[in-house]
Image (cartoon, helix red, strand yellow):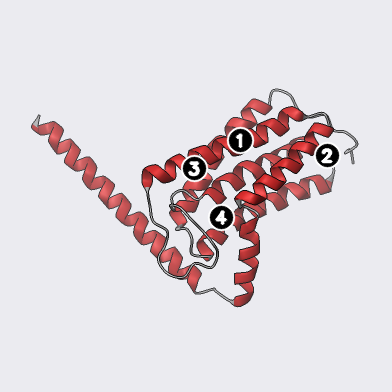
Amino acid sequence: MVELEDEEVLDMSYSIILLDRVWHMDKLIQNRVNEIHTPGWDVFFQLITQLGSFYAFILLGSLVFLYLWLRGHIKYGIMINGGLAAGWFIMKMMKDMVGRQRPAGEQLTVASGMSFPSGHAMLSLVFYGFIAYLLFRNTRNWYGKLAGYILMMIIVLIGFSRIYLNVHYASDVAAGFFLGSVLLLLMIKLSAKKALPDKGNEA
């Protein structure tokens, strides 16, 4: 019984040390990012972050679904929107469980709810990441590949924008990317059974 209590105390101590290190790392990154603020970058990241908003996913998710449906690939349209819905549910559940407040100070964009994990980072990885996967997997021309790389860059920029705009800590974004990557890998595994035929995209 005494040994069990000692193990619990030890586990709690490790958890406290880990959380303290994460907190210090978050503050260090936040301070470094604050040093690069300019009016131009403010506008740029305020625009970029909208690509990971709820309304953007409603609009873009509908357009992608319609495009894939018309191309005869409704399975992938359902999968990408199903991934968004699943990601949204997981994100909301995690936010309610953790209950972490957003960073103190001026926020450069509108943000509501809890901070951990970053829904923008998580859902961007799921949505844009799956589209990039389809492009890399099923296009043979250079501009299809280029579009995939641009989507990957957008994912990174959206994640960074949440730190820059002071609505998330770096660990919130990292957690969002981790959870998003798990969901994305599951979507890829489900879709890998049958590749999309390349319709008119040959080089």
What's the residue type where badge 4 is placed? Gly
Instruction: State yes or no: discs 3 and 2 in contact (Cβ < 8 Å).
Output: no
The CA distance from mark 3 to mark 2 is 35 Å
Q: Dot 4: what SS? A: helix
Q: Quadrant of the N terminus?
A: top left
Cα–Cα gap, marks 4 and 2: 29 Å
Image x and y of residue 200, in percent: 91, 36
Q: Amino acid at mark 1?
A: Gly
Q: Position of residue 158 (x, y in %)?
A: 60, 56
- Residue type marked 2: Arg
Q: Which residue shows up at 65% across the image and 46% down it?
A: 57
Inter-mark Cα distance, 1 to 4: 18 Å
Left or right, 35 with reference to 60:
left
Quadrant of the rendered image containing residue 193: top right
Instruction: Check the picture and name the quadrant holding the C terminus.
Output: top right
Residue that sits furthest to the left in the current view: 2
Other-residue count near label 2 (Cα within 10 Å), few / some / many at <14 / 14–19 / ≥20: some
User: According to the image, label 1 marks what residue?
Assistant: 83
Residue at the disc numbered 3? 91
Estimate the x, y position of residue 113 in percent, counting from the top left. Answer: 45, 53
Ranked by sequence position, the earlier of labels 1 and 4 is 1
In this view, 166 is above or below 53? below
**SS at badge 3:** helix
Crowd rating for badge 3 (residues with CA inside 10 Å; few <14, some 14–19, many 20+): many
Are circles 3 and 1 on residues that touch, CB within 8 Å? no
- Could you tell me how far apart the alpha carbons at marks 3 and 1 are, in whole angstroms? 12 Å
Residue carrying label 4:
159
Q: Nearer the viewer, mark 1 or mark 2?
A: 1
Q: Amino acid at mark 3?
A: Met
**SS class, disc 1:** helix
Image height of 71 relative to 37, above or below = above
